[in-house]
Image: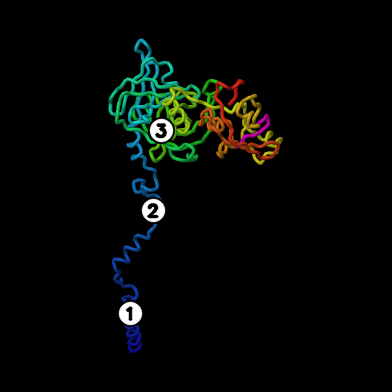
Amino acid sequence: MKNLVPQIIVAIVSSCCTFVLCLYFFQRHPVHSEQVTTQLVSQPAPLNASPRNWSASTLPDFTKVARQVTGAVASISAFNVTGYRVASGSGVVITTDGYIVTNYHVVQEGQRFEVALPDKRSLPARVVGVDESTDLALLRVAAEGLPALALGDSDQLEVGEWVLAVGSPFDLYSTVTAGIVSAKARNINILQGIYAIESFIQTDAVVNPGNSGGALVNTQGELVGINTAIISESGGYEGYSFAIPVNLVKKVMADMRQYGEVKRAVLGVNISDVNARIAADLSLPGIEGVYVTHVNEGSSAYEAGLRMGDVIISVNGTRVSSVPELQERVALYRPGDRVSLEYYREGRKHRSDNVVLKSMGSAAAYGQR
């Protein structure tokens, strides 16, 4: 019995020591609220967070632009002499006093035209001018104080940039769709005529029948193009839509307002795109530029010293890498304007300044640009 007493005492002392150590090391110490807040803020967001909790800054918000532009996009109806509607499309108000731009093919078959404005007014319209080679037309309604779209700069558009298409597909007024710029200076061979100019902005914004003549705008609400065409096997949208660049629209509309017709200048050359074989044969530094296949005697290009086999690479300092780009660039000028041309000849770069552009009427050969 005496031998058990020391063991009991040791057990009691050990238990007391264990209890004291547990109190010291495992008790909860008070933490200031500032520390708690800091710890919580620094926690990473859960990977499976609800989309409702995403930051607004990570997603594009088109609500302001949509409100800004829908009031300036109208619906257009074309009627024949018997009053039957033969075509419909969209139009963009470009001045507060009633000038509206649309596509030529929207008004082509019509004798009488009616514009339905977003404020629910329907007004008769007259045709100021048309241009088949760009598929543009200018209408005017008798109204003042209309909301008009600001005109942007299509040269500054970048592939991958957000854009919105606004129009009246299937008579669904003020329809807004969004997409990106898929490509620039695209030729899809839909316009007829030897002077047809196709240098479309390609987008994946949804465009359907009725969108023709409507607005393509950037995220600042500026007009950058006029929606004109789709590529489709079904007749509806399949992912490809095309718009006329607004810089070309500006020039055509200015001519129509000032002269009642388009004053178009040409270089007087037949052209084709540069390919790998041409680039190698001519010792070009890259596969770019526009190959001159023929120069018409007496034309602007002829008097500037260009000849067959030259490769044009810029107009007034703006580089041109394809036929559509050169067509669009020259179409921005009027007869009598002077431009500078850069081109390669036999592997060497040349430049001709003060090239005086001539009119289509003075052109001598079929197919010249």
Residue closest to the far bottom: 2
Task: Name which residue type carries label 1.
Answer: Ser
Secondary structure of residue under mark 2: loop
Residue occupied by mark 2: 46
| Snapshot quadrant of residue 255 | top left
217 in magenta: no
First in sequence: mark 1 or mark 2?
Answer: 1
Work out whether 294 lies above or below 354: above
Q: Residues within 10 Å of mark 3 (few under 14, many from 20)?
A: many
Q: Which residues are magenta?
A: 306-313
Task: Look at the numbered discs 2 and 3 and tell me whether their residues touch, using CB distance below 8 Å.
Answer: no
Could you tell me what secondary structure mostly forms the magenta stretch? loop
Q: Residues within 10 Å of mark 2 (few under 14, many from 20)?
A: few
Q: Is residue 139 left or right of residue 343?
A: left
Residue at screen point 34% across, 49% down: 53
| Snapshot quadrant of residue 218 | top left
Task: Name which residue type carries label 2.
Answer: Pro
Task: Name which residue type carries label 3.
Answer: Ala
Q: Quadrant of the C terminus?
A: top right
309 in magenta: yes
Residue occupied by mark 1: 15
Residue at screen point 38% across, 38% down: 221
First in sequence: mark 3 or mark 1?
Answer: 1
Task: Give 256 or 71, whichever is nearer the viewer.
Answer: 256
Residue at screen point 51% across, 29% down: 334
Q: Is residue 313 left or right of residue 282?
A: left
Secondary structure of residue under mark 1: helix
Q: Residue 107: x, y in percent? A: 41, 19
